[in-house]
Image (spheres, rainbow, N blue to C red):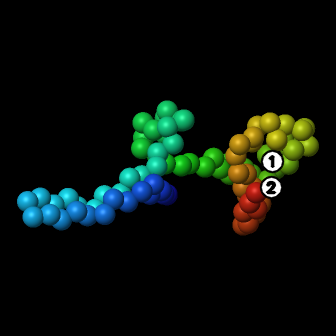
Amino acid sequence: MQEVFSKTERPAKRGLWSSEPARDEYHIDTDDLEATRQGVSAYQKHALVPHDAYQALYASGEAESIFSGFTVHVVSGNQVISEV
C-alpha cells in the first residue's frame, strides 16, 4: 500500500506569453534515509505472529522488547487478533 501526502498545491498560471500547469508538492520524511531513498512518505511496522509463539514470548516477558515499535497481529486458528 502506498500513501502520498500532499504538502501544498500551486495553482496553474496562464498568461499572454506563457503558462504553467498546477503542481502538487508531496511530503517525504527525510529523517529516515532508507525511506527517503525509496521515496516513501510514511511507513508502519506490523508483525504477524502465530498464537503459540506470541503466547510463549509473552509468558517469558520478552514480547514487549521484541515487538517494540510494531503493531502485532496474532494468528489464532482462522482469526487474526490485532493490536495485542
* Marks 1/2: CA–CA distance: 10 Å
Q: Please indicate whether residue 76 sits to the left or right of residue 25 in the image.
A: right
Residue drawn 76% across and 57% down?
83
Residue 49 in view here:
yes
Q: Amino acid at mark 1?
A: Tyr
- Residue under label 2: 84
Q: Amino acid at mark 2?
A: Val
Q: Please indicate whether residue 67 sits to the left or right of residue 7 in the image.
A: right
Residue 4 in view here:
no
In the structure shown, which secondary structural element does the residue marked by tag 1 occupy? Answer: helix
* Residue 23 higher or lower than 35, as above or below: below
N-terminal of the pair, mark 1 or mark 2, is 1
Residue drawn 51% across and 42% down?
29
Residue 8: image quadrant is bottom left
Which image quarter is the C terminus in?
Answer: bottom right
| Other-residue count near label 1 (Cα within 10 Å), few / some / many at <14 / 14–19 / ≥20 | many
In the structure shown, which secondary structural element does the residue marked by tag 2 occupy? Answer: loop
- Residue under label 1: 54
* Residue 36 higher or lower than 54, as above or below: above
* Residue 4 higher or lower than 45, as above or below: below
* Closest to the observer, 39 or 30: 30
Residue drawn 76% across and 37% down?
66
* Closest to the observer, 8 or 53: 8
